[in-house]
Image (cartoon, grey):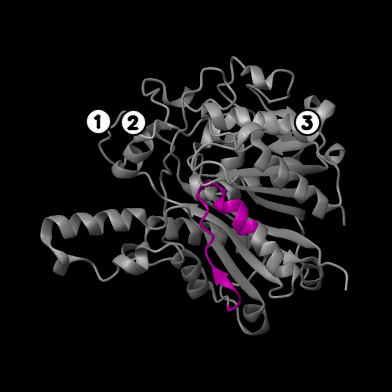
């Protein structure tokens, strides 16, 4: 039996640039930064006091007032993004019958309900265990985001969370595609959600010296590939796609937005936070994804880079791009969405996969902002500095790499029917 083809039929996003796909994409193409001084709490005790926070978020379209109080912010993000994706895909408000049984959910998160857990631990310390909310566990554990999507919208197929730090969203989409290929589902709701902008988490990343401390100029703080970069900026949000077997999508009249043709996943087995020398784990993930896609590096026109704005991480990814594409590396348009969205951790791979799909569909590569002095490792590469680039894109790779040495690569191609 020939391998099933997997298409994307719906997309949803919640980010610091907007609470839907359209506004986020417009912000990315315009080169607008979503990074500001933290507003959700007083950041004055922190050395890094900036973040890419979601603003003006409203979950009332998917949850009533009581349910909002009983649902962690990361789950709310995931529900809203899933609903957007389902609507674009033409899926009903609630799935029933054969469609429900053939549809699964993989919603990943790097941290889970960290806000809920933080509140619960604070309550325990200050007021005692008898005052802990009975919703602490179901709001705080990382798999309940996927569970809540199914509870609210009716999916009865495979349902779980991927948790692999910053590679989470890429793993969720890749593993969802494999679930369809092996026949365990016809449709998968897949992506990542994160809501981790809280003092202990930001303080923890700062203690690692992983964060930018450019507090006096927040919009310029996230500087992927720039020689003056000093760390990443925390972000939050969600990205969700509807993946579907092509035959199933055609049968129900859904419009394919792009085709997911390759997925690679590897481990560095090297260091808990630093990439393997030369980005070799990323190289192996991309080569595996290309092999499964039956494509060569010459077929790829665009790379959506993981590019967090950390000194060693960006350098290793640039080295990986050179290794993958060789003498043609300068031909490929590279972009770093985190320059505007911050680092959304478990949501990043899914948000950036959607940006990759939109780049293919629109023929536009969003800029890497704040790139004023290119790292020597990036000299001669097309890193899309400053402003968007209009060009034809037939196929593209979306990279995601996580603490612990986990790497993913997704290959998308233009849908041509």
Q: Which residue is mark 1?
A: 44
Q: Where residue 255 sits in the image (x, y, percent)?
A: 76, 60
- Residue 342 lies left or right of residue 320; in this view the side is left
What kind of element bears circle 3? loop
Tell me which residue sits at (80%, 33%) in the image. Answer: 325
- Asked if the magenta segment contains residue 289, the reply would be no
Question: What segment is highlighted magenta in the picture?
Answer: 156-173
Residue at the farthest bottom position: 97
Q: Is residue 7 visible?
A: yes
Mark 1 surroundings: few (<14), some (14-19) or many (≥20) residues within 10 A: few
Q: Position of residue 315 (x, y in %)?
A: 61, 27
In three-dimensional space, the C-alpha distance between marks 3 and 1, rounded to whole angstroms, equals: 42 Å
- Which residue does the image show at 64% across and 69% down from the upper left? 91
- Identify which residue, 28 or 334, lies in the foreground: 334
Q: Are marks 1 and 2 in contact (CB under 8 Å)?
A: yes
The local secondary structure at tag 2 comes to loop
112 on left or right of 314: left
Give the mark, 3 or 1, whose residue is nearer the N terminus: 1
Q: Is residue 416 above or below residue 179?
A: above
Q: State the SS at label 1.
A: loop
Percent x, y for residue 110? 47, 52
For residue 49, which numbered disc appears in the image? 2
On the rendered structure, is 141 left or right of 165?
A: left
Q: CA distance from mark 3 to mark 2?
A: 35 Å
| First in sequence: mark 1 vs mark 2 | 1
- Asked if the residues shown at circle 3 and circle 1 are in contact, with their CB atoms under 8 angstroms apart, the answer is no
Eyeballing the image, is 50 above or below 239? above
Q: Earlier in the sequence, mark 3 or mark 2?
A: 2
Residue identified by numbered label 3 = 332
Number of other residues with Cα within 10 Å of mark 3, as a class: few under 14, some 14 to 19, many 20 or more: many
Q: What whole-number distance in Å separates the C-alpha atoms at marks 1 and 2? A: 7 Å
The image quadrant where one finds the C terminus is: bottom right
């Amino acid at each position: 039996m020939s391998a099933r083809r997997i298409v994307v039929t719906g997309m949803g996003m919640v980010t610091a640039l907007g609470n839907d796909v359209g506004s986020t994409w417009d912000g990315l193409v315009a080169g607008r930064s979503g990074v500001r001084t933290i507003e959700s709490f007083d950041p004055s005790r922190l050395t890094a006091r900036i973040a890419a926070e979601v603003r003006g978020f409203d979950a009332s379209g998917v949850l009533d007032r009581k349910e909002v109080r009983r649902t962690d912010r990361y789950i709310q993000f995931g529900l809203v993004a899933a609903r957007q994706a389902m609507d674009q895909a033409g899926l009903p408000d609630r799935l029933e019958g054969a469609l429900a049984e053939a549809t699964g959910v993989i919603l990943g998160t790097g941290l889970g309900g960290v806000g809920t857990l933080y509140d619960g631990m604070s309550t325990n310390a200050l007021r005692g265990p008898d005052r802990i909310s009975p919703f602490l566990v179901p709001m705080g554990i990382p798999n309940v985001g996927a569970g809540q999507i199914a509870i609210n919208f009716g999916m009865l197929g495979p349902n779980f969370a991927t948790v692999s730090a910053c590679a989470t969203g890429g793993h969720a989409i890749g593993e969802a595609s494999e679930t369809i290929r092996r026949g365990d589902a016809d449709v998968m709701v897949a992506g990542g959600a994160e809501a981790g902008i809280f003092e202990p988490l930001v303080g923890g990343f700062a203690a690692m010296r992983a964060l930018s401390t450019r507090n006096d100029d927040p919009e310029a703080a996230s500087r992927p590939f720039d020689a003056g970069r000093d760390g990443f900026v925390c972000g939050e949000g969600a990205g969700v796609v509807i993946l579907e077997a092509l035959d199933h999508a055609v049968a129900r009249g859904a419009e394919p937005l792009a085709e997911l043709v390759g997925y690679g996943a590897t481990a560095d087995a090297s260091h808990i936070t630093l990439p393997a020398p030369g980005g070799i784990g990323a190289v192996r993930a991309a080569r595996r994804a290309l092999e499964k896609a039956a494509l060569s590096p010459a077929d790829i026109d665009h790379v959506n880079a993981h590019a967090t704005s950390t000194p060693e991480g960006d350098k290793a990814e640039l080295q990986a791009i050179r290794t993958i594409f060789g003498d043609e590396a300068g031909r490929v348009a590279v972009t770093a969405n985190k320059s505007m969205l911050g680092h959304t951790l478990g949501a990043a791979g899914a948000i950036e996969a959607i940006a990759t799909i939109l780049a293919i569909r629109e023929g536009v590569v969003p800029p890497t902002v704040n790139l004023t002095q290119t790292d020597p490792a990036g000299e001669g590469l097309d890193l899309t500095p400053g402003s968007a680039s209009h060009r034809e894109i037939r196929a593209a790779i979306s990279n995601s790499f996580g603490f612990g040495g986990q790497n993913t690569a997704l290959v998308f191609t233009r849908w041509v029917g």
